[in-house]
Amino acid sequence: MTSPTTMQNSQVQNTQKKYSPLKEFWKSFKKQKAALVASIFIVLLIVVAFIGPYIAPYDPFEPNYDALLEGPSASHLAGTDEYGRDIFSRLIVGAKISLMVSFSAVFLGLILGTILGLISGYFGGWIDKIIMRSCDVLFSFPDLLLAIAIVALLGPGINNVIIAVMIFSVPSFARLVRGATLNAKENVYVEAAQSMGASHVRVLWKHIFPETISELIIFVTMRIGTAILAASGLSFLGLGASPEMPEWGVMLSSGRDYLGTSSHVVIMPGIAIFLTVLAFNLIGDGLRDVLDPKIKNN
Amino acid sequence: MPEHVLRVSDLETSFTRDKREIKILRGVNFSIRKGEILGLVGESGSGKSLTSLSIMQLFHGTTGKIVNGSIHFNGHDLTKMSESEIRKIRGKQMAMIFQEPMTSLNPVLKIGKQLMEAIEMHLKLPKNESKHHAIQMLKSVGIGRAEEIIYEYPHQLSGGMRQRVMIAMAMACHPNLLIADEPTTALDVTIQAQILELMKKLKEENETAILLITHDLGVVAEMCDRVVVMYAGQVVEEADVFELFASPKHPYTKGLIASVPKIGDNKEVLESINGQVPSPQNMPNGCKFAPRCNQAMSICHQESPPTVKISATRQCSCWLYVKKDVEVNA
Amino acid sequence: MPNSILKVENLKKSFQIAGGLFQKKQYVNAVIDVSFEIEEGTTFSLVGESGCGKSTTGRLITRLIAPTNGSIIVDGKEVATAKQSELKHLRQTVQMIFQDPYASLNPRMKVKELIGEPLEIHTKLSKAEREKLVLEMLEVVGLNAEHADRYAHEFSGGQRQRLGIARALITKPKLIIADEPVSALDVSIQSQILNLLKQLQQEYKISYLFISHDLSVVEHISHYIGVMYLGSIVEIGRKETIFNEPKHPYTKALIASVPIADPTLRKKKIVLTGDIPNPKNPPSGCTFHTRCPFASDICKQAIPEMKKINEEQSVACHFVN
């Protein structure tokens, strides 16, 4: 018989080295080959977006009337457009616009949606009803239609595209976070924190928000893809970036007159949009396999 | 020589994880006679539930597999049978009830339908007879309004009622062996008492052998004829129930019995066993209990103890009972 | 008479289970009428089967939920009607230990954050001062300093419950509400935790409100016991009297139903017939009459009053005087 205070401490499993959540994450994420390749692609794209103007082989705005609508060649990797501008250079510089628009729109939507979702799920009652019914109203419009309506209301321009894409992101984030909050609220340790006297802000921030993070990370990556598509779509319709900007949607739009004769004018920005959106979705899928608790438990 | 319904010898079962084979059961031996209640006792991680799954060969969806040993049921080795042969035995000659009956009842089928399906499949009765049989079975487990219950869904019943239905279903084909894995753990004490009485009654009426798996020594003392104590995937002690509680031999059994608070004895401090069950990936050398044992000797940390026959009815795997002068063939 | 740390009177809680804008509202009475008192440094246990309202009572006292009616006096202060913002005193005086040591510890926090959290909430201590107290507390509950940087999932069930105890203890509360603290643990571990709880009670003069369905555990740890059935206490008294001379038929049946870990004491039990009634639709009169072997007409009609039958025992039954 032993008194409990003199219990041996050899009991803690000293099997593994120090447990670190980040290391665990990396260990499983490494196994997601497609997502890994996609992440490398996105990292490269981000680097390119930053240093674009310095590495672009040609000035993306400079017309060259000697080389109109030339197909891809060694001197113009992706060919030239109707003004003879180098499409490859324009894609490189345009990456910055596309990424900036989608990142900032999703980021703003994330913050607003998360706050609304946390409040809605945690407090419930009438405040939950108001927030969720408002989201339902926004949900009842198709994404792009809503964005078009918002831009039509605010006037065209990149900043308004950001606002539009943000607004149609908010309800999805709010709903996602609300669901995760409702789940997290059921955890006994949340009740434990309340019984200790933790304030609502503390409970939300320390005990509930961390539970929503993994779902948020997955959703954000997916959502960036959607945002790129939406922003390009708006620009394609002439509601976004101004026509001379090397934005991918704009390029798609201005090239469509030449689809029959010089299809590369449309295909090249199309491929850029396609690859980027695909990459974000692949990362999202990979992250889901690694992070999603519902999958992880199996 | 009494007739053995089930004899498990040298059973070893393992799981594969990250391409590594992890042995959970490391040589389990015991047998059950006709009409006997054998208690299989152990704490979480002792392998007692896996033993029952191995006997039933219910591994679907897991990497579990029997790697060694034999399970003789009515004289036939289950480990050598094909899946379809086992399926004929399972449910008919050998039935199982679980801790949480809700998980083993289909939530979208009415009680009667589920019972009748089992009866039709194994007893090959026509529909009207199987319905009659189902109602008979429900009545025999003490469900008075059996005629109504067969038209209800599992979620409409209380936990105790569901466990009665499970028992009715298990007993429907008059099996030779009933495996009950923590059958009353999820139930309230007054309901537990009802279910235990019921199991005793059914055993006496049908001469069914029962393998009762539990962590509750109270239930064991109340129900069993013989007891097998498991620790870390091995049997450490086997004895008649009266002998076991009167004079436990293995230090683990001693500790286990001493750590249960008993109504009526006013001990200030309870005994306890230091430490915890080792994880399967991290098994100590020698006797698996040695790190927690207060009587451990140096040999205990080096070599696994042999199983020592102490009397006709009991044996124990512990170096304390190995006679010094006898050569040991561990 | 020693000081009372907790005094609960006529506590009642009903939950709305259906209804709303267009439907008729329906209520279930989880706690109907509960009164008891806990003296400083003693253990009072609420025991009963599922649905009897013992856990709800615990959560009412910590004001995780608000009572419908009744009074809760914690260390001299009424908390039943206090607003959430006025509960600071309560939150420091009363701490909780939960049943499931796996679920009640945030898996994303390190041990030192987990155990230090109450200090962070209630004191203005610096991080270093908090950590010092956490390390001391780890020693007290039988763990040690090197465990402070680990996460809860790296511990076994018994050790996690030690962490839960350390967290409850760190603000030096006067009352700890322990809701089934050992029912998720293996027996050999369960006894370690019970011993620890007893030892801490002697060292720190804490009072416990111990909530459990396990009578053997309750008998071991309590000084006083309240037996609950369907939202009400049916019998209350000193542990010895409750176990040696139970008066209420339910208490008798409950004690008799517990399997004893000794095969020589096998006996024919008073097996209660029937199920526990659904609290949504409780029986009239004495709620126990549907299962009571002695029930008569009066039991179906009148709710029995709690009667003090001697200095140490009160019973709510028509046939006990």
Image (cartoon, coloured by chain):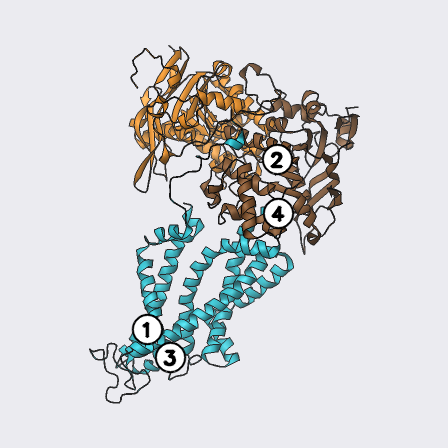
Identify the chain of the residue marked 2, using the numbered disc in the image: C
Identify the chain of the residue marked 3, using the numbered disc in the image: A
Q: Which chain is cyan?
A: A
Residue at mark 1 to residue at mark 3: CA–CA distance: 11 Å
Task: Give the percent coordinates (x, y) of residue A91.
Answer: 32, 76
Q: Which mark is residue A250?
A: 3
> Do discs 1 and 4 belong to a common subunit?
yes
Q: Which chain is brown?
A: C
Position of residue B126 relative to residue B75, above or below, is below
Query: Along the line of sight, which residue is nearer the eye, A287 or C312?
Result: C312
Identify the chain of the residue marked 4, using the numbered disc in the image: A
In this picture, residue B58 sits left or right of residue C9: left
Q: Which chain is orange?
A: B
Query: Along the line of sight, which residue is nearer the eye, B328 or C64?
Result: B328
Q: Which residue is mark 4?
A: A196
Mark 1–mark 3 contact, CB under 8 Å?
no
Q: Which residue is mark 2?
A: C50
How busy is the neighbourhood of tag 4: few (under 14 within 10 Å), some, or many (20 plus)? many
In this picture, residue A169 sits left or right of residue B30: right
* Amino acid type, label 1: Gly
How busy is the neighbourhood of tag 1: few (under 14 within 10 Å), some, or many (20 plus)? some
> Do discs 2 and 3 belong to a common subunit?
no
